[in-house]
């Protein structure tokens, strides 16, 4: 079963729901020349100033993969060419006090430039060994 199959994606959602997860986020690990694209949260946002991979909420009626494509395009202006792998998830406490599960996928994009930011104040292509301030979960994800 491929990571893009409806059955695989539905299984991810079902497992999260069974675990009592209240929010879903889809996230893209975009690499170019062994560097990963990171976005910095606006200072006045929840977890302001932290760097993260492109990610966003799975909306009602949307699959995790639909959200992955939409959020990547909205936050970076980049179009996903291919989802190449599922690289796991992590859970975190969200700004509303619930638990969110972030589903992380390795992707390729049609082109890596220009990155057009709409929700973040900076972006950078970082080497996994030289990451700026990211969460421990993101650091572990990128290092693997």
Image: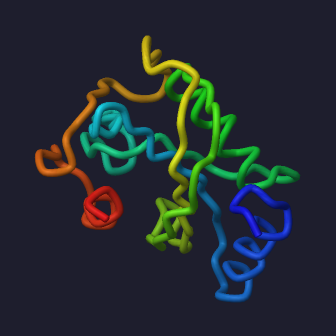
Specify whether 46 is left or right of 66.
left
**Residue furthest to the top:** 114
Tell me what residue is drawn at x 58 percent, y 22 percent: 110
In the rendered structure, the answer to whether residue 96 lies left or right of residue 131 reads right
**Residue 140 against residue 18 in the figure, above or below:** above
In this picture, residue 16 sits left or right of residue 31: right
User: Number of marks in the image?
Assistant: 0
Q: Is 101 situated above or below 66?
A: below
Residue closest to the eye, 33 or 6: 33
Percent x, y for residue 118?
Answer: 49, 21
Residue 4 location in percent, x, y? 74, 55
Residue 82 is situated, as x and y percent measured from the top left of the image, at: 64, 39
Say which of 45 and 87 sits in front: 87
Quarter of the figure with residue 126 = top left
Q: In which quadrant will I find the N terminus?
A: bottom right
Please tell me which residue is depicted at 35% across the width and 35% down the height of the picture: 37
Tell which of 86 and 75 is nearer to you.
Answer: 86
Horizontal and vertical percent for residue 9? 76, 65
Quadrant showing the C terminus? bottom left
Q: How is the image coloured?
A: rainbow
Q: Nearer the viewer, residue 14 or 21?
A: 14
Which residue is drawn at the image coordinates 64% and 31% (left, top)?
81
Which residue in the rendered view is the most extreme toward the left?
A: 130
* x 57%, y 62%: residue: 86
């Amino acid at each position: 079963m491929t990571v893009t199959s409806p059955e695989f994606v539905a299984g991810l959602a079902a497992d999260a729901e069974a675990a009592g997860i209240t929010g879903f986020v889809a996230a893209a690990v975009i690499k170019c020349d062994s560097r990963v694209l990171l976005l910095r949260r606006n200072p006045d946002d929840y977890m302001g100033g932290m760097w993260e991979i492109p990610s966003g909420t799975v909306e009602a009626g949307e699959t995790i993969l639909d959200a992955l494509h939409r959020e990547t395009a909205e936050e970076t202006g980049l179009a996903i060419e291919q989802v190449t792998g599922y690289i796991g998830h992590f859970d975190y406490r969200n700004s509303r006090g619930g638990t969110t599960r972030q589903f992380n996928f390795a992707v390729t994009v049609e082109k890596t430039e220009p990155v057009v930011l709409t929700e973040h104040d900076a972006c950078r292509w970082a080497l996994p060994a030289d990451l700026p301030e990211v969460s421990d979960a993101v650091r572990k994800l990128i290092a693997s």
